[in-house]
Amino acid sequence: MSNYVEYNGKIAFHPGYYIKEIVDNSGLTQEDFAKRLDTTPKNLSVLIRGEQSLSVDMAMKFSRMLNTSIIYWLNLQNAYDALIAEFKSEKELENERKVFALFDYKYFKDNFGLPDLPRKIDEQIKEVRNFLDVSTLSVLCKKDMAVSFRSSATEMSEANIIKANIMVQIATNMALKRKAPQFNRKKFEESIRYALTLTKEHDRFYKLVYDAFFDSGVVFIILPNLPGSKINGATKKIGDNIMLMVNNRRLYSDTFWFTLFHEIGHIINNDFGISFDDECGEAEEFADEFARNSLIPLKEYEEFVDMKDFTVPAIKNFSSRIDRDPAIVLGRLQNDGFLDYNDWNTKSLRYKYNVKVKYSI
């Protein structure tokens, strides 16, 4: 290791650089100088090479031997450390630029009020870093950074991983700001049953579900989709609470409620992580089955299917009997292959939400 470091036209001099000059000009060997300094030749040599920091004890010895102040020597070390930290920060910024290039700053500006900084990439990076509350955007490259990725059935690119982590980080930070009561499983199960009564309340369900879940210790967050994240939803334990996040890219009522109850299923199964497109495995099968049977009771659904009448009036009648939004029944029938997704006769049953949520952290 050298006793000075060069980077981007700047040089950081380790105290060892100056100590070598002093030893060379003293006319003494390093061994003799070390003895006068009351240290070992090895310690002096390591210090001269810049391989260890100048300690307070060594600063005191140099100040006494050379009739200088202790502060002078400690300032040399502090100046070196500060420049090295600056070099590392600049190198890390180079890495952050590569990460930043994989997503769009516009997502943060449009949805979360970050300032408009056209063409000022480094300032945009700083804004996103501060907003996400991370020391570097490079941490977003790590799978399972904030929560388990479970086992995605599709190969994930670095951009997918970064964007997924961004969404979970935002949801986590939002949940941390909302001081919910301690998680109570019994209350949560009651709030789940209550949520099922709201599937037809298209204009006001979110606030009602949010409040019910919140009282049970679950913070329910709907986030705007970050294109390319491939996230459907995520759950995470946060202290005494649980964060439950769903993506708003699937805001047709049937897909929204299925996604929500899929994530609820993960919580019920004490399985926390991110749900991606096309996932498989035992945990996903459990969550899917929980969502299907919660939204439409299995026995009633089987009886309805046996009737083989999938007209709009029949779907509406059955939906009314089980107190569900008809779109949920339609979505189940389409998923199970009883109706075609492109059947225009049933288009009137679909409902697209326009959930307006105030996003602030």
Image (spheres, rainbow, N blue to C red):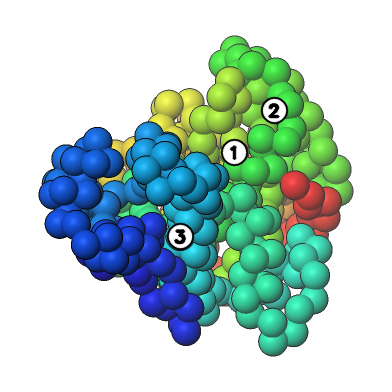
Kindly tell me whether residue 88 is visible in this rendering: no
Mark 3 or mark 1: whose residue is earlier in sequence: 3
Q: Which residue is mark 2?
A: 213
Residue closer to the observer: 331 or 76: 76
- Can you tell which of label 3 and label 1 is closer to the viewer? 3
Picture layout, residue 78 above or below residue 120: above
- SS category of the residue bearing label 1: strand
Q: Which residue is mark 3?
A: 80
- SS category of the residue bearing label 2: helix
**For residue 27, which quarter of the picture?**
bottom left
Across and down, in percent, residue 307 comes to 52, 45
Q: Residues within 10 Å of mark 1 (few under 14, many from 20)?
A: many
Q: CA distance from mark 1 to mark 2?
A: 9 Å
Mark 1 or mark 2: whose residue is earlier in sequence: 2
- Can you tell which of label 2 and label 3 is closer to the viewer? 3
**For residue 353, which quarter of the picture?**
bottom right
Across and down, in percent, residue 52 comes to 29, 49
Amino acid type assigned to the residue bearing label 1 in the image: Leu
Residue drawn at 77 percent across, 65 percent down: 114
Q: Do callouts 3 and 1 mark residues in contact (Cβ within 8 Å)?
A: no
Residue drawn at 28 percent across, 45 percent down: 281
Across and down, in percent, residue 61 comes to 37, 38
Q: Do callouts 1 and 2 mark residues in contact (Cβ within 8 Å)?
A: yes
Q: Residues within 10 Å of mark 2 (few under 14, many from 20)?
A: many
Numbered tag placed on residue 244 in the rendering: 1
Amino acid type assigned to the residue bearing label 3 in the image: Tyr
Lateral position of residue 84 relative to residue 324, left or right: left
Lateral position of residue 288 relative to residue 208, left or right: left
